[in-house]
Each structure stands twice: as structure tokens, then as C-alpha cells.
């Protein structure tokens, strides 16, 4: 299945408490559970005013539906075409 990077504009994201992040995570996991195995949350990166999430999903529409059901912004959804890392240089 394709992998996606989702950019979410969330002002003050970097200042969210661990309890707030836990609540967001619980909401996301609940929506994912209801949506079934065709979408999976891999991980997220929290920055000052954004959260970048990595998902595996059947298509972009599922990523956007997850955002809609969870009440999360999905300001930009980009399909990953290739993954590189330091071993790519070898």
C-alpha cells in the first residue's frame, strides 16, 4: 500500500502537553479502528506549528477521511514515491 506524509497546520502544536498529545493520539486510533485495516498510522513529528504524520493507506481519500472523522486538519497530503537514508549513498 502507498505511504503518505500528511502536513497538519496546528498553531502551537509544539507546546501541546503530553496529555493533549495523548488525547489526539487516542482520537486518531479510535478513528483508525473504525476504518479498518486499509489505513495505518506509522508515526508523527510535532514541530512548532505543525504535525507531520506518516500513514500507510489504500489511497489519499482514506487519509483525508481519517482527518475528517478525527477533526484533524490535513492541509497537505503527499504520496511518498521513494525513501532514502544514509545507506542510499553506499
Image: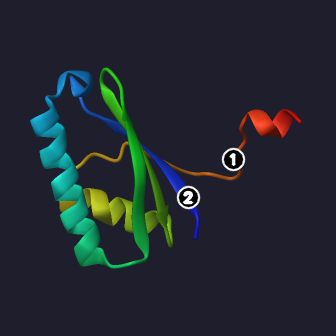
Inter-mark Cα distance, 2 to 1: 10 Å
Residue 47 vertical position relative to residue 24 in the rendered view, above or below: above
Tell me if 45 is positioned left or right of 2 in this view. left
Tell me if 71 is positioned left or right of 40 in this view. left
- Residue 57, given in percent of the width and then of the height, sits at 48, 67
- Residue 25, given in percent of the width and then of the height, sits at 22, 50
Is the residue under label 1 in contact with that under label 2 (CB below 8 Å)?
A: yes
The total of numbered circles placed on residues is 2
Residue 74 vertical position relative to residue 11 in the rendered view, above or below: below
Residue 81 visible in the picture: yes
The residue carrying pointer 2 sits among few (fewer than 14), some (14 to 19) or many (20 or more) residues within 10 Å by Cα, namely: many
Tell me the element at label 1: loop
- Residue 40, given in percent of the width and then of the height, sits at 41, 65
Residue drawn at x 45%, y 57% as measured from the top left = 55
Most foreground residue, 57 or 33: 33
Residue 71 visible in the picture: no
Tell me if 51 is positioned left or right of 68 in this view. right
Residue 11 vertical position relative to residue 3 in the rendered view, above or below: above
**According to the image, what is the colour scheme of the structure?**
rainbow
- Image quarter hosting the N terminus: bottom right
- Residue 52, given in percent of the width and then of the height, sits at 41, 38
Q: Which mark is residue 3?
A: 2
Q: Which residue is mark 1?
A: 83
Tell me the element at label 2: strand
Residue drawn at x 19%, y 39% as measured from the top left = 21
Residue drawn at x 16%, y 44% as measured from the top left = 22
- Image quarter hosting the C terminus: top right
The residue carrying pointer 1 sits among few (fewer than 14), some (14 to 19) or many (20 or more) residues within 10 Å by Cα, namely: few
Which comes before the other along the chain, label 2 or label 1?
Answer: 2
Q: Residue furthest right?
A: 90
Amino acid at each position: 500500500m502507498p505511504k503518505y506524509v500528511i502536513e497538519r497546520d496546528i498553531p502551537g502544536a509544539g507546546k501541546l502537553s503530553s496529555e493533549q498529545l495523548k488525547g489526539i493520539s487516542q482520537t486518531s486510533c479510535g478513528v483508525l479502528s473504525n476504518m479498518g485495516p486499509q489505513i495505518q498510522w506509522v508515526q508523527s513529528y510535532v514541530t512548532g506549528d505543525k504535525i507531520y504524520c506518516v500513514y500507510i493507506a489504500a489511497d489519499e481519500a482514506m487519509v483525508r477521511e481519517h482527518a475528517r472523522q478525527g477533526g484533524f486538519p490535513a492541509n497537505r497530503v503527499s504520496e511518498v514515491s521513494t525513501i532514502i537514508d544514509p545507506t542510499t549513498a553506499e
